[in-house]
Image (spheres, rainbow, N blue to C red):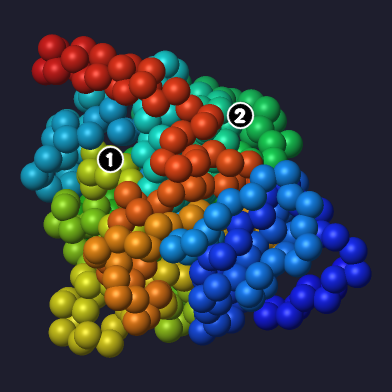
Amino acid sequence: MNFEMGRVVVTEILACDILISDVSLLPLPDPNHFIEKGWLAIQGPEILALGKGDPPACAAKKRMDGAGCLVMPGLINAHLHAPMTLFRGLADDLPLKSWLEEHIFPAEGKWVSGEFVYWGTLLACAEMVRSGTTAFSDGYFFEDQAARAALQSGMRGLAAQGILDFPTPDSPSPAESIQRIKNYIRDYSGSELIKPAIFAHTVYTCSPNLLKECRSLAERHGVPLVTHLSESRSEIEEVMKKYGRRPVDHLENLGLLSSSLIACHCVWLTEEEMDLLARRKVRVVHNPESNMKLASGVAPVPDLLARGVAVGLGTDGCASNNNLDLFQEMDFAAKLHKVHRLDPTVMPSQTVLEMATLGGARVLGMEEEVGSLEAGKKADVIVLELNRPHLQPMYNPVSQLVYSATGADVRDVIIDGKLIMENRKLLTLNEEEILEHAKEWGRKISAKR
């Protein structure tokens, strides 16, 4: 059997688990290529084949009618704190420093437990699947419980165990956090869907020695190191006062700038710092809505992309966003930079769509597995309904996805070849139970405020 884009030569009947037919396809390896009517076949966890027109003779276990729909790679949320769905709306309209130190840290100290993380992550997974996200990068405490919830949902993820230079909800000391990280990496290093990582919160909440220890641990185990970097002006001032260096230079001095580092936010960067991040192949995550809501500033994403830096798109946590809809995040990302630079050509829709798909895959180290529609890649795909007033007429499908589509347009979600949502019904999660637990957590937290 031989498959080529737009042409199928069949020597035997195609056998597959799932066949989606009569459907539009994008993005493909060539970002300018769009199939208006085609098909996609899934076998096991992978995309078996795809092409134009009608599918070949096929023995499919499940057939899905894609008429009036579009198949695309699942979106990748490259930075969030999933359990913070349970803090959604807890402390809004505040600057980052007071929001974090006067509200979020105290709330985490009081409420965060393994149970909190488990149910908060399930709530996040339900929200992400419903809005077309199939893979994510999380960083929090009790991360084994976040990983447990993610596996239950069927989602793919990079889940990073958190550490700070003071007691955290899951560890009374950094030394015990380090041991927790070691145990967590050991327990999840063989998982197909959840990859372990280390989350060192920031350069001002982690001492130089702790950051170096995290770096050594990440190198020893071959896992990524995730951190918040240069997120706010106050961070720059605090780190300068404490160490005599800006945050990027501080990490360079400690030997942390490398291709294994995922730096989230990167709002306050100089030209020299962007050059350095590019040379060190640091991976960056842009979180426009969170940065806007906390008035942190506008990250120089066009300049980072021009330097060849891998940039993904993230929502950040629900306490500073307040939702996990990456379609909405794409829309904001494109428009924010246009108005900030007074240039409508900056951050075109194709660039933003790539950030939310293949760009995010590059940041998470998953570009060989997911991020585009290609035979042999993991079958992490979503089906969107196009027959909606806000999506017609469709002159440019990429533009329509970025500027008009919403998470509510997602009909079906397939991850690792398994149907996770079909016709807007979650198949792996008990949504009613999750919502009841979320409401109960809300009642408990509200009663003690």
Instruction: Note whether 107 is above or below 153 in the view shown.
Output: above
Query: Of the numbered discs in the image, which one, if any, rests on residue 184?
Result: 2
Q: Viewer-nearest of labels 2 and 1?
A: 1
Q: Nearer the viewer, residue 330 or 84?
A: 330
Q: Indicate the amino acid at tag 1.
A: Cys
Q: Residue furthest right?
A: 11
Residue 324: tell me if it is visible.
yes
Q: Residue furthest left?
A: 93
Disc 1 target residue: 318
Which of the 4 image quarters holds residue 195? top right
Residue 168 relative to residue 143: left or right: left
The C terminus is located in which quarter?
top left
Residue 166 in the image: x percent, y percent? 37, 29
Which of the 4 image quarters holds residue 348? bottom left
Q: Indicate the amino acid at tag 2.
A: Tyr
Residue 285 in the image: x percent, y percent? 41, 60
Residue for point 14% across, 18% down: 446
Residue for point 55% across, 82% down: 33
Q: Residues within 10 Å of mark 1 (few under 14, many from 20)?
A: many
Label 2 SS: helix
Task: Measure how far apart labels 2 and 1 are at the Cα level.
Answer: 24 Å
